[in-house]
Image (cartoon, grey):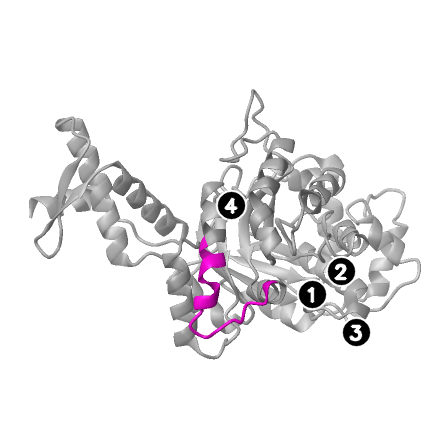
Amino acid sequence: MTFKRGLHWSFVSTLVKPPATTAAAAWLPRAVVAATRSPLPLSRPFSTTRIVAQHAAQHSDSAGPASAPSSSQEGTTSATGSSQPSGPGQDDALSRSRRCMLYVPGSSEKMIKKSQSSPADTIIFDLEDSVAAHKKGSARETVFLALEAAARPGPELAVRINPPSADRSLAEDDLDMVLPSHQLQAIVVPKVEHENDVRLIVEKARALRPSSAVDKGSLALVLSVESAASLLRMPRIIESIREGLGQDSLTGSLVGASTKQPVAQIVALLFASEDYCASTGILRTRDRKSLLFPRAHMATIAKAYNLAAIDMVCIDYKDEAYLVDEAEEAKQLGYDGKQAIHPVQVGAIQHTFNPTPEAVHRAARILHLYEHASASENRGAYGLKESDGGMTMIDRPMLLQASAVVGKARKAGMKVPEASELEQEQQA
């Protein structure tokens, strides 16, 4: 994001009546226009000054699809290993990396500004637990402006709305504000208890997402599991929503003759440990044994439905060794990423969910040798000589695991050995 001083909420109110020769207000959500009739000033100037010009000129729905990114923007990888896809066909909602999802309070302009430099794969602007009830309205406005001011390419931009299962009208107000953003990529849905909690977002997305956002791909939906009922009902919820979107209920792939991506699709399940404990009476212990079953069960459901699994928050954010241990355990359970509540957690989490260089090298060898063995010897299995001199039998299941490791490495911007390098090693 790029923030500059000087944008007051009173300035945004001038967009309600733009000159007749422009469509400056076309990109504003109805909730913003309504709010400007009795402006609620932000606590201090929100530092953006280019929003109006950029969006009136570039993001009007009548202007058609957004222009293609320049060659300098495609396939960027940060120095910290945060690789973000860009361009048509690359920014796939279902397959992108979500190693760390960092929460940023939607009511804090200071923290939102700091998040612009975070290497996290996903930034979640939070409108739920971190925002006091009397600040919900102003937080929505702040989050909308932050979304529109965010520099691209960059991390996935998500918003956690208030739970439809608890207060539908509050959730609708959130959606009315943020869905018209041209840069919103994901919605985190807390306390999902029923398919109608998710169906609300899909219906709102159909009505409110601008064509420039739709052209970039489906809105990603991350469903938060926060109770025993949610955990047990989740398969039915996923299948119901996918069937309504014209997707295969298990894989999420399109069915029939349609090739058009749905307006929204479920991409991940997220485990909310504190709410789950409150719902079930489980006592969260430091060794995490009391949560082993629900964590493993949720990860299994996610994998059964071709979804990413996002692990619980580590609330002891100052103890990095404990954080890494908890993340390693989640990785062993099949999780793809973890939530973070403090910027200091991001680096350790993302590093933990990367495959090790040794694992990447071994996986690349497996794929390379399997290709040669199957082509020249017509075998379905073969032996791989390990670094310790032992031999490991490689067959299709291990091939699939190796392919997954290489895929994760590439998403993270890690080096994957080329075929020529592996050939030289084999001959040495």
| Of residues 57 and 337, the one drawn nearer to the viewer in this rendering | 337
| Of residues 236 and 406, the one drawn nearer to the viewer in this rendering | 236
In which quarter of the view is residue 214 placed?
A: top right
**Marks 2 and 4, Cα distance to the nearest angstrom?**
27 Å
SS class of the residue under badge 2? Answer: helix
- Residue placed furthest toward the right: 37
157 sits left or right of 373 in the view:
right
- Residue placed furthest toward the front: 281
Placement of the N terminus among the 4 image quadrants: bottom right
Residue at the image position 78 percent from the left and 56 percent from the top: 167
Answer whether residue 125 is magenta in the image: no
Residue at the image position 68 percent from the left and 69 percent from the top: 130
State which tag comes first along the sequence, 1 or 2.
Answer: 1
Do the CB atoms of the residues marked 1 and 2 lie less than 8 Å apart? Answer: yes
What amino acid type should be assigned to the residue bearing mark 3? Ser
Magenta-drawn segment:
280-296
Residue pointed to by mark 4: 86
Residue at the image position 62 percent from the left and 34 percent from the top: 262
Q: How many marks?
A: 4
Residue pointed to by mark 3: 43
Closer to the eye: label 3 or 2: 2
The circle drawn on residue 248 is none
Residue pointed to by mark 2: 140
Compared with residue 380, is residue 298 higher up or lower down, i.e. above or below? Answer: below
What amino acid type should be assigned to the residue bearing mark 4? Ser
- Residue 272, given in percent of the width and then of the height, sits at 57, 61
**Marks 4 and 1, Cα distance to the nearest angstrom?**
25 Å
Regarding residue 72, the answer to whether it shows in the image is: no
Compared with residue 336, is residue 112 higher up or lower down, i.e. above or below? Answer: below
